[in-house]
Image: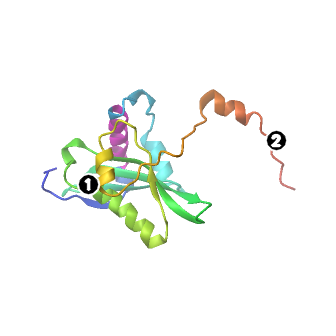
Amino acid sequence: MTRGATPTIRPARPEDVPAVVAMVHELAAYERAADQCLLTGEQLTAALFGPAPALYGHVAVDADDRPVGFALWFLNFSTWAGVHGIYLEDLYVRPAARGTGAGRLLLATLAAMCVERGYQRLEWWMINWNPAAGFYASIGARKMDEWVPYRLSGDALAGLAAQAATPARPPR
């Protein structure tokens, strides 16, 4: 993509899945965690286009409609505000398309959706050494350091799940 060319943002389509999966793997490699990225095209297709999708995606495309960046997101909910918001799971722009405004346009698209739908928040996490922190600050994003993230996975998740009461069976 030519650095001067402005990309177009549109919802992801099934034919975009291979490019988005490739970019997710590129992002994992950039974040020094390539071995942890297991996403397949089948998984992403099911998540985005299955009968009850809970994941949504937008792509930044070049003049030939080839994806050069993506945003994968889902709805969250603030019990305090009483409204939904958007949680941005991943945002990535291929190196050749950086500087074209693709990242800003992807974020602007999600921000516009929030405003149109009455959502009060667009949130994401960023690895602490990512140089995009300056860009995020330049668009008015505020670092949230008063909340500490927690995660249960693997053996700890299975161990806690084993402590759950047996679910009641519905009446027949």
Q: From which residue to which does the magenta span run? A: 17-29
Query: Label 1, on which residue?
Result: 102
Residue in front for this viewpoint, 156 or 68: 156
Query: Label 2, on which residue?
Result: 166
**Mark linked to residue 38:** none
Q: Where residue 27 sits in the image (x, y, percent)?
A: 34, 38
Q: Where residue 127 sits in the image (x, y, percent)?
A: 40, 38
Q: Where residue 171 sits in the image (x, y, percent)?
A: 87, 56
Residue 163 included in the magenta stretch of the image: no
Packing grade of label 1 (10 A; few <14, some 14-19, many >=20) is many
Query: Which residue is rendered at x = 33% and y = 42% of the image?
Result: 23
The kind of residue tagged 2 is: Thr
Residue 159 to residue 117: above or below: above
The kind of residue tagged 1 is: Ala
Q: Where residue 10 sits in the image (x, y, percent)?
A: 33, 61
Packing grade of label 2 (10 A; few <14, some 14-19, many >=20) is few
Query: Which residue is rendered at x = 59% and y = 33% of the image?
Result: 153
Q: Earlier in the sequence, mark 2 or mark 1?
A: 1
The image quadrant of residue 154 is top right
